[in-house]
Image (spheres, rainbow, N blue to C red):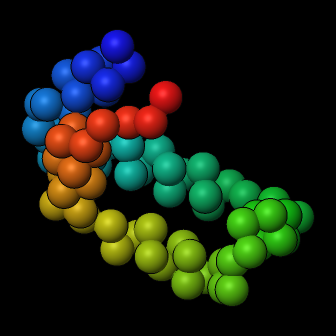
Amino acid sequence: SINNAISSLLAGKITDEEFTKAKTEVLTEINGKTAVDWWLDADTFRLTSVSEDRQSFEKVSLRDVQTVAERVSKNPVVT
């Protein structure tokens, strides 16, 4: 089932290397956005501040990600 698949994916701890690589890739994508991209994101996702949204992402830690992964792995996913 999808619940079992997700649980098994999240069962292992996310390593610092995996986290750093993923965060770097996302930041590279964020930094490559044009003004139009930012405007569309702000409108689509109802962002109050693009700058605050970016800063919030930069503050995400490995522990934050591990906490969410643990929570998702313990709770069933609606299918």
Compare residues 6 and 23 and report the one nearer the observer.
6
Farthest residue to the right: give it.
Answer: 36
Note whether residue 17 is visible. no
Q: Is residue 11 left or right of residue 35?
A: left
Residue 66 percent coordinates (x, y): 19, 51
Give left or right: position of 21 versus 42: left
Residue 30 visible to an observer of this rendering: yes
> Toward the viewer: 43 or 74?
74
| 62 displayed left or right of 45 | left
Give residue 76's position: percent from left, percent from top: 30, 37
Relative to 31, 63 lies left or right? left
Taking 45 as reference, is 56 above or below it? below
Which image quadrant: the N terminus? top left
Residue at (38% x, 19% y) in the render: 2
**Depth check, front residue: 35 or 41:** 41
> Dividing the picture into quarters, in which one does residue 43 lie?
bottom right
The residue located at (22%, 50%) in the rendering is 71
Question: Could you tell me how many numbered marks the image carries?
Answer: 0
| Quarter assignment of residue 38 | bottom right
Q: Position of residue 73 (x, y in %)?
A: 22, 38
Quadrant position of residue 77: top left
Q: Is residue 4 above or below residue 35?
A: above
Q: Residue furthest top?
A: 1
Q: Residue at x 56, y 76 (%)?
A: 53
Question: Could you tell me residue 78's position as x and y percent?
Answer: 44, 36
Residue at left 80%, top 64%? Answer: 44
**Where 1 sits versus 54, above or below?**
above
